[in-house]
Image: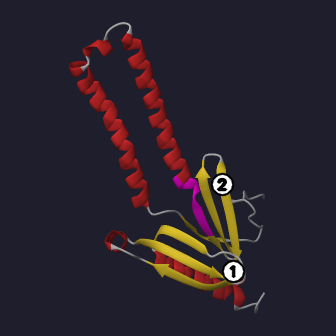
Amino acid sequence: MNIKKLFPGQEEDEVIVLVVREHWFFMLTRVLAWLIFVLVLFLFDRYAPQYMPRLFEDPYLNFVNLGKNMYVMFLILGLFMLWTIYYLNVQIITNKRIVDIWQKGIFSQRISELTLPNIEDVTSEVKGFWATVLGYGSVEIQTAGEKENFLFHNIPEPREVEKLIINQTGLYKGPKGNE
């Protein structure tokens, strides 16, 4: 039986413990910003015929319709990009390592990984009113050596994620000794 791997480089005996994405609040704010551009289209359809009637007569009508169609296509593309980048930006905690997949754009992705024995310290931070009320914050994972620290921004339940990482590190080092 061949099980499909859930992320690039996943080992056969590697178990995914947690998959973390950015808090839903940040996706909501981006969608609300996107809705402002949708509102612009509705406002144009409502008020442009009143205040710019010549745009809706020949020969300009075809250009206005073309412009509106292109605007709608870019709106749909923008929503698709918002969802794709939100969905593909992910932090995966396994029984062996932490994998940070950062989707910069549609065709640009960075994958960083950190093995559990290299973790020195884990710190969570919830800062501000909305972060406290909605339960999001940051988790910083300090590493041994010259590797840069892992920093997960705006993730849900950062204290729980911190505890989970510390527990996984203890489980990895504990029963089998320092590996």
Chain part drawn in magenta = 86-92
Residue 83 placement, left or right of 45? right
Q: Which residue is mark 2?
A: 109
Q: Position of residue 139 (x, y in %)?
A: 52, 76
Q: Considering depth in this image, is 46 or 175 the residue closer to the camera?
A: 46
Q: Considering depth in this image, is 76 or 177 the residue closer to the camera?
A: 76
Q: Position of residue 51 (x, y in %)?
A: 22, 21
The quadrant in which residue 89 appears is bottom right
Q: In this picture, is 41 found above or below 52?
A: below
Question: Residue 130 lies in magenta, yes or no?
Answer: no
Q: Position of residue 129 (x, y in %)?
A: 31, 72
* Amino acid on which the number 1 mark rests in the picture: Leu
Q: Residue at x 35, y 69 (%)?
A: 134
Mark 1 surroundings: few (<14), some (14-19) or many (≥20) residues within 10 A: many
Q: Residue at x 38, y 18 (%)?
A: 64
Q: Identify the disc placed on residue 169.
A: none
Residue found at the far left of this picture: 50
Q: Residue at x 43, y 55 (%)?
A: 27
Whether tag 2 and tag 1 are in contact, CB under 8 A, the answer is: no
Q: Considering depth in this image, is 1 or 116 the residue closer to the camera?
A: 116
Q: In this picture, is 60 found above or below 82?
A: above
The quadrant in which residue 146 appears is bottom right
For marks 2 and 1 on the same chain, the one whose residue lies earlier in the sequence: 2
Q: In this picture, is 56 found above or below 158?
A: above
How far apart in space, not on screen, are marks 2 and 1 (Cα)? 23 Å
Q: Identify the disc placed on residue 116.
A: 1
On-image quarter of the C terminus:
bottom right
Q: In this picture, is 69 found above or below 58?
A: below
Q: Position of residue 174 (x, y in %)?
A: 69, 92
Residue found at the far top of this picture: 58
* Amino acid on which the number 2 mark rests in the picture: Gln
